[in-house]
Image: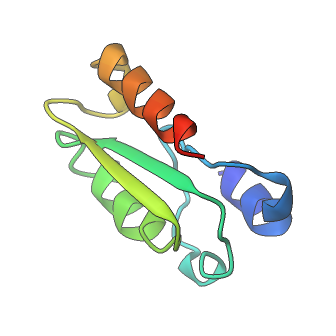
């Protein structure tokens, strides 16, 4: 709820954006001008918030999506090893 407004208002101060179990992601009009690299990670078993957040966050123009198989919400708790690998791989590409 707090990270996206900060990103929209101060994207020049943010090197990368990795939302963790995000909520309130529906302000898609604000997404377009943001060029900050974003990593979107969600669990394929998170059929409510995960799918809605993914649909909205995919409006960030410079994003990468990682789907964690068998994971729910929040996905990082179901498989911390996969989560950390995805985060480290993403950060190494910056």
Dividing the picture into quadrants, the one containing residue 43 is top left
Image position of 24 (left or right of 73) = right
- Give me the residue at 60% from left, 84% from top: 29
In the rendering, at what x and y percent does residue 39 appear? 48, 48
Number of residue marks: 0
- Give me the residue at 33% from left, 43% from top: 42
| 75 vs 91, nearest the viewer | 91
| 65 vs 24, nearest the viewer | 65
Image position of 81 (left or right of 60) = left
Height in image: 13 above or below 43? below
| 59 vs 62, nearest the viewer | 62
In the rendering, at what x and y percent does residue 74 appear? 38, 31
Dividing the picture into quadrants, the one containing residue 36 is bottom right
Scheme of colours in the image: rainbow
Height in image: 89 above or below 12? above
Image position of 3 (left or right of 31) = right
Height in image: 78 above or below 31? above
Image position of 12 (left or right of 17) = right
- Give me the residue at 58% from left, 57% from top: 37
In the rendering, at what x and y percent does residue 76 appear? 38, 25
In the rendering, at what x and y percent does residue 77 appear? 36, 18
- Give me the residue at 68% from left, 81% from top: 33
Height in image: 29 above or below 47? below
């Amino acid at each position: 709820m707090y990270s996206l407004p900060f990103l929209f208002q101060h994207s020049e101060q943010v090197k990368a954006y990795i939302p963790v179990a995000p909520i309130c992601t529906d302000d898609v009009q604000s997404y377009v001008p943001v060029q900050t690299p974003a990593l979107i990670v969600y669990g394929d078993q998170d059929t409510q918030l995960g799918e809605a957040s993914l649909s909205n966050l995919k409006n960030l123009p410079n994003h990468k999506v990682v789907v964690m198989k068998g994971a729910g919400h929040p996905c990082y708790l179901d498989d911390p090893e996969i989560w950390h690998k995805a985060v480290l791989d993403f950060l190494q590409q910056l």
